[in-house]
Image (cartoon, rainbow, N blue to C red):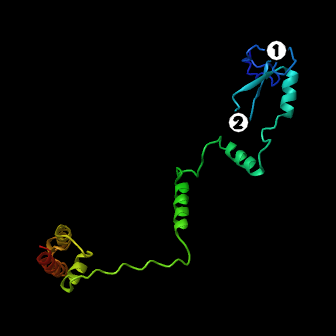
């Protein structure tokens, strides 16, 4: 025996029909066919007899009252089942990058006068060279200078650079700058 995979015909009564009368005024037949109540609520139904559901469907227009742009947007959203999409392998990164780019462009203006740099504070002349060696900006604290000194000393120590003579000379300059800064800030 061949299994029957037949679907019910489109005009067959809905098996989930509630067994109520037709919603059309003045009709005494059973409401065996459902029709959506509105575009915004597609899960609530009118129940009609066959004659009235045909008339309702013939007059019902899902896109009624929508502009051309709204219809286009609806059709595009329907092509992906109303879910957001992006190119394969990006997980929405392109969208985030586009948003970041647009935010950057909003902040950028042509012909805007560039802000002038803040005036340099009065740095004692004996500290200028030492601050440049440490790549620090005045005013500084002794703790900041010590932390930067430790970093630079480890980086330029001859043992860390296989006895490189240039690293040794650089460490001597760093030690002199540290002594100068420590003497002023202590």
Query: In this rendering, would 154 be left or right of 108?
Result: left
Quarter of the C terminus within the rendering: bottom left
Establish if 130 lies above or below 34: below
Residue indicated by mark 1: 30
On the image, the x and y values in percent for residue 20 come to 77, 14
Residue indicated by mark 2: 40
Element at label 1: loop
Question: At 84% across and 25% down in the image, what residue appears?
Answer: 53
Asked if the residue under mark 1 is in contact with the one under mark 2, i.e. CB atoms within 8 Å, the reply is no
Question: At 73% across and 48% down in the image, what residue appears?
Answer: 70
Q: Quadrant of residue 163?
A: bottom left
On the image, the x and y values in percent for residue 51 come to 88, 22
On the image, the x and y values in percent for residue 165 come to 17, 81
Q: Nearer the viewer, mark 2 or mark 1?
A: 2
C-alpha separation, residue under disc 2 versus residue under disc 1: 26 Å
Establish if 53 lies above or below 180: above
């Amino acid at each position: 025996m061949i299994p029957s995979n037949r679907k019910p015909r489109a005009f067959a009564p809905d098996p989930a029909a509630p067994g109520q009368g037709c919603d059309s005024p003045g009709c005494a037949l059973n409401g065996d066919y459902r029709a959506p109540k509105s575009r915004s609520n597609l899960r609530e139904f009118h129940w009609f007899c066959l004659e009235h559901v045909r008339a309702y469907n013939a007059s019902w227009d899902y896109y009624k009252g929508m502009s051309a742009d709204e219809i286009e947007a609806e059709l595009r959203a329907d092509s992906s089942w109303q879910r957001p999409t992006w190119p394969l392998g990006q997980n929405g990164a392109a969208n985030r990058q586009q948003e970041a780019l647009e935010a950057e462009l909003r902040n950028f203006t042509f012909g805007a006068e560039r802000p002038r740099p803040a005036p340099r504070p009065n740095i004692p002349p004996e500290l200028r060279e030492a601050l440049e060696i440490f790549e620090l900006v005045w005013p500084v604290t002794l703790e900041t200078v010590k932390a930067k000194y430790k970093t630079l000393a480890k980086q330029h120590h001859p043992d860390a650079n296989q006895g490189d003579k240039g690293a040794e000379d650089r460490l001597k300059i760093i030690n002199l700058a540290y002594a100068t800064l420590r003497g002023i800030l202590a």
